[in-house]
Amino acid sequence: MRRSSAAGLIAALAYCALSACASKPTPTINAMNPNKPRPVVVDETAAAKVNLQLGVGYLRQGNLPIAKEKLDRAMKQDPHNAEIHGWMGLLDERLGKDKEADKEYRTALELAPHSPMLINNYAVYLCSHHRTDQGVRYFEQAASNPLYPTPWAAYTNAGVCLRSEHRDAEAAQRFARALQSNPAYSEAVFQASDLDFAQHKYADARLLIELFLVNSPATPDLLLLAYHIAQAQNDADAQAKFAARLTKEFPNSDQARTRAVARVNPG
C-alpha cells in the first residue's frame, strides 16, 4: 500500500514564443535622423520570464532538450533569478546530473533563502537521494515558515522521507504534526493509517480513516486502505461497505481496478 507524495513549484505556461514577444520589436524612427532606426532596448528580465515559462512548459511535457535551451537562455538573461535556478535544478535532476542539480538548488536558496517553495523542493531532492536528515530539516524549515501556505504537506513529506528509510517512529511523529496542523489533510491521514496498518495496528488505522470520513470527502486511496484493514480484521461487513463506496464513488480509479483484480484473483 506504500506510496509517496511530493511537492513542487507551480508555474503558468506561456503561450507566445520569445521570438514573437521580445526579439522582433518594431523599430522606431529617430527624429534627428529619420532614415536611422532608434536602437531598441530589450527588457532582459521580462524576456527571461518568458523563457522561464516556456522552459517549465517543455519540462512538464518531458521535452528536456528544448526545456534546457529555454532555461539556459533565461539564465543568461537573468542570472540572479532564484526561480530559474530552482527549475534548472529540477531539469538537471531529470537529466541525471545530480551534482549540478544540487548546486542549482543551493544557488536558488542563496538567492531566496526564505522561499518556502524552494526549501521544500530542495528537501524533496535530498530525500530522493537518501540524504534524509538534511531533507527532513529542510521540510521542517518550510513548515515553520509563516509564508508557506500548507505546512501540513511539508510535515507529511518529512514523514514519508523518514519512512522510506524505515525510521517509522520518527515518521509517525511527523504525520501527527501534519494532522495537528490540518486534520482534514487526506494525504496525512492515509500515510499515518498506512503506517499503522503496516505495524498491524488495525484498530488505530481504521479509526483514523473513519473519523476522517465523517466530515471529509473520501479518496480512493483511503477507501482501498480501509478495505484492506477490514479484510485484515476479518470484518466482512466493513469490507463490503468500503468496497461498495470505492466502486460507486471512484469507478474508474486505479484503486477500484486493483480491488477488482484482487477479488478475481485472490491469490
Image (tube, grey):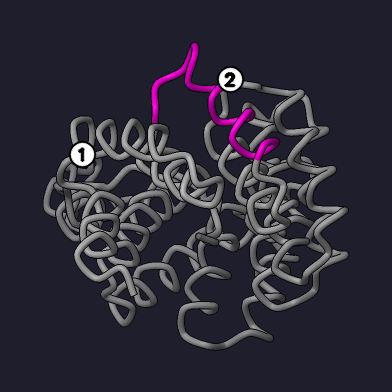
**Disc 2 element:** helix
* In magenta stretch: residue 207: yes
Residue type at tag 1: Thr
In-image side of 35 versus 266 (left or right):
left
Q: Where is residue 92 in the image (x, y as percent from the top left)?
A: 53, 79
Question: Which residue is pictured at 66% across the width and 58% down the height?
Answer: 198
Say which mark, if any, is on residue 237: none
Overall secondary structure of the magenta stretch? Answer: helix
Rounded to the nearest whole Å, what is the CA distance between mark 2 and mark 1? 21 Å
Examine the rendering and report whether any part of residue 137 can be seen.
no
Residue highlighted by disc 1: 247
Q: Where is residue 22 in the image (x, y as percent from the top left)?
A: 25, 52
* In magenta stretch: residue 126: no
In-image side of 206 versus 219 (left or right):
right
Question: Which residue is pictured at 65% across the width and 68% down the height?
Answer: 125
Residue highlighted by disc 2: 211
State which quarter of the image contains the C terminus: bottom left
Q: Give the range drawn in magenta.
A: 203-218
Q: Which of 178 and 42 is in front in this view?
A: 178
Q: Nearer the viewer, residue 36 or 67?
A: 67
In-image side of 112 versus 140 (left or right):
left
Examine the rendering and report whether any part of residue 31 can be seen.
yes
